[in-house]
């Protein structure tokens, strides 16, 4: 999945649930979905309601655990942002 289509799929999956919308936007603007070390935390598929809309979901618990374990290196600013989760 290309970066623009992955961003659209993440947005589609989060639509209507504001905390997930905000989290997805933060991921997208910081380019995390395109990172090879983050890709394993994203599952892509299609909408069950129409069968054609691309959707993508983030395994937030897994990503945060990996971040806490030092398996997802990031800047000090991003570490501070995720500390409240």
Image (cartoon, grey):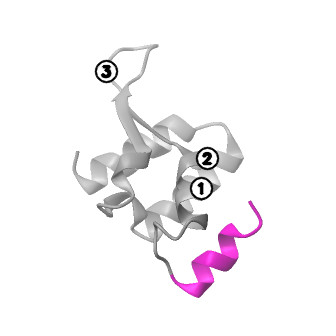
Task: List the residue tagged with mark 2.
Answer: 61
Closer to the eye: label 1 or 2: 1
Q: Residues within 10 Å of mark 1 (few under 14, many from 20)?
A: few
| Image quadrant assignment for residue 38 | bottom left
Residue depicted at 59% across the width and 77% down the height: 78
The vertical placement of 67 against 22, above or below, is below
The vertical placement of 32 against 42, above or below, is below
What is the secondary structure assignment of the residue under circle 1? helix
What is the secondary structure assignment of the residue under circle 3? loop
Mark 1 vs mark 2, CA separation in Å: 6 Å
Residue 38 belongs to the span the image colors magenta:
no
76, 52: nearer the viewer: 76
| Image quadrant assignment for residue 9 | top left
Task: List the residue tagged with mark 1.
Answer: 65
Q: Main secondary structure of the magenta part?
A: helix
Residue 18 at what x, y percent from top left?
69, 46
Mark 3 vs mark 1, CA separation in Å: 32 Å
Question: Does 12 sit left or right of 15 as displayed?
Answer: left
The vertical placement of 76 against 32, above or below, is below
Mark linked to residue 52: 3
- Point out the tag, 3 or 2, that comes first from the N-terminus: 3
Residue 47 visible in the picture: yes
**Disc 1, disc 2: CB below 8 Å?**
yes
56, 75: nearer the viewer: 75
Question: Does 42 sit left or right of 82 as displayed?
Answer: left
Residue depicted at 35% across the width and 28% down the height: 45
- Point out the tag, 3 or 1, that comes first from the N-terminus: 3
Residue 54 visible in the picture: no
Provide the residue span drawn in magenta.
75-85
Closer to the eye: label 3 or 1: 1
**Disc 3, disc 1: CB below 8 Å?**
no
Question: Does 79 sit left or right of 31 as displayed?
Answer: right
């Amino acid at each position: 999945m290309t970066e623009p289509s992955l961003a659209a799929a993440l947005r589609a999956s989060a639509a209507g649930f504001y905390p997930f919308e905000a989290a997805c936007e933060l991921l997208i603007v910081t380019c995390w979905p395109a990172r090879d070390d983050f890709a394993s935390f994203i599952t892509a598929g299609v909408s069950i309601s129409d069968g054609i809309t691309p959707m993508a979901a983030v395994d937030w618990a897994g990503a945060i655990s990996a971040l806490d374990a030092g398996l997802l290196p990031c800047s000090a600013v991003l570490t501070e942002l995720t500390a409240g989760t």
